[in-house]
Image (spheres, rainbow, N blue to C red):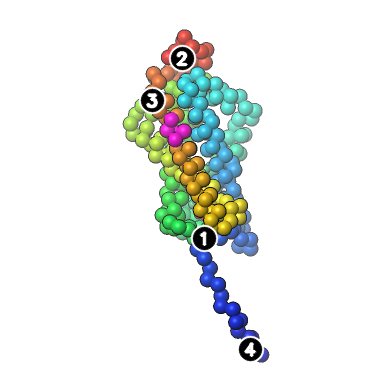
């Protein structure tokens, strides 16, 4: 017997963010993990790094040295770094490049400004990746060890931001990472169904854009502080003087 045709015409699917769906094999879980790692721990780390640790540089070399000493004194620092920062970033970045290469997206469609936002999310991720590799190499693995000599932190950053090309790289890296994270929060909340409905998503987008300006603004204020203070020492003896307090350095 032939099936009776439905009298109701199919409703056209509206453009917007489709939720992540189960039943797509193991790539469903990889995509969920990619999405989640963007917020926790990678996004949480970026939040702390820009808005707390680097913001302390606005208070000058001694305040910055204190913050770095505090971070270095946390228990199990190498384990925290490996499992809380490096491996999650590496996974998110490599899987992000794979999504980019495959031309895939977790979202049904990037709404409103469509392709631009889609492309920006990929390019800002790529730029942030290049910046993070270089920044980690120069700050963590070469030159004076800042965990041992936190007092040299301000001077070590200054030795880079006083060189114009590197300063510009800092600015571009900051803007790229801030945009990627701020718009990423919006994507995440839309995808996981945390913010639903077109009106609510539009309002939330404005909040995320405001967050982008806060991240960028605080980051630029920290960079300005590095450039406006007199050059600080980057050797072990000078580092101890910075930590010893006022009267020993500028
Ligand atoms: C600064 C470090 C990074 C942070 C804080 C971060 C954060 C985020 C967040 C929160 C999202 C939204 C999650 C979602 O799509 O559900 C996201 C998406 C994405 N990230 Fe990252 N990310 C970072 C670095 C990278 C890097 C280095 C890449 C490499 C290209 C990358 C590629 C992507 C891609 C392609 C998406 C969009 C996925 C899609 O549209 O389906 N991210 N990121």
Q: Nearer the N terminus, badge 3 or badge 1?
A: 1
Q: Is residue 180 left or right of residue 27?
A: left
Q: Residue at x 56, y 78 (%)?
A: 9
The residue where tag 2 is placed is 238
Q: Which residue is mark 1?
A: 16
Q: Which residue is tagged 3?
A: 227
In the image: residue 249, left or right of residue 10: left
Picture residue at 42% right of the left edge, 40% below the top: 175
The number of discs equals 4
Among numbered discs 2 and 4, the one appearing first in the sequence: 4
> Which of the marked residues, 4 or 3, is nearer the chain's N terminus?
4
Q: Position of residue 12 (x, y in %)?
A: 52, 71
Mark 4 crowd level (few <14, some 14–19, many ≥20, 10 Å Cα): few
Q: Categorize mark 2 by other alpha carbons within 10 Å: few (<14), some (14-19), many (20+).
A: some
Please tell me the numbered disc located at residue 2: 4
Circles 1, 2 touching at the beta carbon (< 8 Å) = no
Mark 2 to mark 4: distance in Å? 88 Å
Whether the residue under disc 2 has CB within 8 Å of ligand 1: no
Rendering coords of residue 48 (x, y %): 55, 34
**Vertical side of 101 occupied by 47: above or below:** above
The residue carrying pointer 3 sits among few (fewer than 14), some (14 to 19) or many (20 or more) residues within 10 Å by Cα, namely some
């Amino acid at each position: 017997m032939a099936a009776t045709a439905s009298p109701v015409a199919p409703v056209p699917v509206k453009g917007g963010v489709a939720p992540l769906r189960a039943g797509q094999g193991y790539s469903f879980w990889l995509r969920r993990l990619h999405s989640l790692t963007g917020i926790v721990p990678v996004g949480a780390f970026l939040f702390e790094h820009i808005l707390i640790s680097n913001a302390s540089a606005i208070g000058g070399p001694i305040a910055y040295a204190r913050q770095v000493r505090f971070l270095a004194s946390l228990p199990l620092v190498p384990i925290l770094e490996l499992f809380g920062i490096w491996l999650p970033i590496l996974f998110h970045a490599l899987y992000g490049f794979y999504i980019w290469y495959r031309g895939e997206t977790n979202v049904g469609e990037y709404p409103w400004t469509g392709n631009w936002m889609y492309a920006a999310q990929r390019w800002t991720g790529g730029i942030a990746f290049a910046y993070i590799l270089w920044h980690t190499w120069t700050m963590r693995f070469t030159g004076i060890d800042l965990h041992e000599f936190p007092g040299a932190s301000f001077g070590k950053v200054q030795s880079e931001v006083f060189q114009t090309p590197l300063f510009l790289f800092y600015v571009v890296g900051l803007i790229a990472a801030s945009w990627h994270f701020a718009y990423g929060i919006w994507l995440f909340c839309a995808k996981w169904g945390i913010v639903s409905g077109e009106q609510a998503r539009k309002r939330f987008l404005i909040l995320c854009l405001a967050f982008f300006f806060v991240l960028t603004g605080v980051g630029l204020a920290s960079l300005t502080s590095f450039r406006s203070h007199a050059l600080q020492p980057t050797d072990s003896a000078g580092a101890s003087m910075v930590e010893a307090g006022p009267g020993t350095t500028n």
